[in-house]
Amino acid sequence: MWFLIKGSFWTTMTLVALSFLAGQPVERTAERPGVEMTEALGAAGEAYRYISALCTEKPDVCQKGAETFVVLQQRARDGAKVAYQLIDRHLADQEGGDLAAAIDGPETDALTTGTVTVIPVPHAKPAQ
């Protein structure tokens, strides 16, 4: 279980980091308020300390945490888009050369068959 949590965390952080490579900046609108990194880290620290009763003890932290997750979700989505575009571009470059070779080459590979003459059979272990 802990492996899944750590894996999800680092995957999200990687996608968030990739989102900074996107050509278009993230638009800040009234529906998606901007969150500074220090505010996000502060909200994460508070959430860790008060995870059992976060919203009842400190509703403002709960609200800021929700805003932080919205922004991280958008950043992760943008990062995934950048990663998809990089992979797509890389595969398109590789397929371009391979496609021409595949068209000129034979339709099937040569198949060589043979007969297995001896199948090794394990011997019984001697009794002691």
Image (cartoon, rainbow, N blue to C red):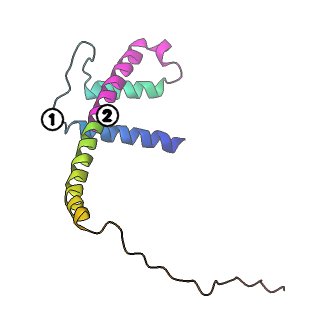
Whether residues under marks 1 and 2 lie with C-beta atoms below 8 angstroms apart, the answer is no
Count of numbered labels shown in the rendering: 2
**x then y, percent, for residue 43:** 37, 24
Residue 38 lies within the magenta run: no
| Depicted 105 relative to depicted 113: above or below | above
Residue occupying the point 50% across, 24% down = 51
Q: Residue furthest left?
A: 23
**Residue 119's quadrant in the figure?**
bottom right
Residue ranking furthest to the right: 128
Per the rendered image, the range of residues in magenta is 51-79
In the rendered view, does 125 fall on the left or right side of 108?
right
User: Within 10 Å of the Cα at label 2, are there few (<14), some (14-19), or many (20+) other Cα atoms?
Assistant: many
Element at label 1: loop
Q: Which amino acid, mark 1? A: Gly
Q: Residue furthest front?
A: 107
Which quarter of the image is occupied by the C terminus? bottom right
The chief SS type of the magenta part is helix
